[in-house]
Amino acid sequence: AIKLKRIAGLKFYKKILTTIGEDHLDLHNTFEDYLNTKISFFRNGESAILNADSLYIERFKNIAKKHTLYGIERPADVRGVIISEELENVNFVIKYKGNEDIINLHMSGTFNVYNFLATSTFIFEEGYEIGYIEQFAKNIPVVPGRANLLQKGGKNVFVDFAHNPLEIENVLKYLRRFTDGKLITVLGAVGFSTEKKKTEMGKAASIYSDFVIVTTDDPRGDDPVEIAKGILKGVKGNGKIVLDRRNAIKEGISMLNKGDTIAILGRGDEVEAHYKDKTVYFKDLDAAKEELSEI
């Protein structure tokens, strides 16, 4: 939207920087162009909320002169200090202007703590006190297709929208910490992704997974076989191609034993996959629930 000037002329009340990874390079061609496009969004002088832990934070700070920082690892105006993590939730301290409160976030992943801190920073700037944040945390609904956890008999099924190498790495690194047994990953890539992105997706998946099942995502008219082959090139270790996504999910879940986890990545809550000659209705979460109920 920024690159194609779809939002040109709009004035934003607040702008928030979350994370930056290699994505949308089919449009931007290079990561530097992608990064510069993001940076350009913060040039117009509106107040900005920035992730202090971003690798490129200094470049954003130089452009967004009026900014507030949030983060976990580096000094920030709003800071989170993680106390404990489980697969189902994260407990952390949120600190702001000398005050602090303990938050029990019923979501998986450090990445969700970052999202919570970004939102909290906005809330603080709107004049709310830190005590309000604890109540806010208790009422956050689960977002379909984002860090959704299903469990049965000690077997874990995790459905998430992670669809680029950095997101895949972050999700699987997190799941690896809480998986005593095998970690299996099911993923594909959208059509016309760059060869580099597909290879890096496969590599990221294989680093943390015991087995990788490469399948179809949303081909968008591209050849599903060639997409899958591109991902499999990056898989170092155990992996295979199962083009039919429902069968891939079924096979992955059938491999689970107690203590194992399967990560179904890439589509989140999307409901359509587009082929050259047809559009197919498919939801990962629905398929995962049905297949898990069968074992």
Image (cartoon, helix red, strand yellow):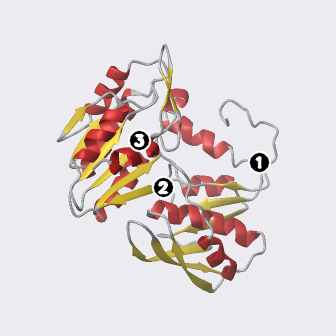
Going from the N terminus, do you reach mark 3 or mark 2 first?
A: 2
* Contact check, label 1 and label 3, Cβ < 8 Å: no
Instruction: Relative to 218, say whether 116 is above or below.
Output: below
Q: Alpha carbon of mark 1 to alpha carbon of mark 3: how far?
A: 44 Å
Residue where numbered disc 2 is placed: 55
Kind of residue indicated by mark 2: Leu
Residue where numbered disc 3 is placed: 287
Callout 3: helix, strand or loop? helix
Please provide percent x and percent y for residue 58. Answer: 57, 57
Q: Alpha carbon of mark 1 to alpha carbon of mark 2: how far?
A: 22 Å
Instruction: Give the residue drawn at x 46%, y 41%.
Output: 22
Of residue 171 and residue 79, the one placed in the foreground of this image is 171
Please provide percent x and percent y for residue 1. Answer: 67, 35
Of badges 1 and 3, the one in the foreground is 3
Instruction: Give the residue drawn at x 34%, y 28%.
Output: 244
Residue where numbered disc 1 is placed: 44
Q: Is residue 203 left or right of residue 60?
A: left
Kind of residue indicated by mark 3: Ala
Instruction: Give the residue drawn at x 28%, y 46%.
Output: 253
Instruction: Give the residue drawn at x 59%, y 41%.
Output: 36
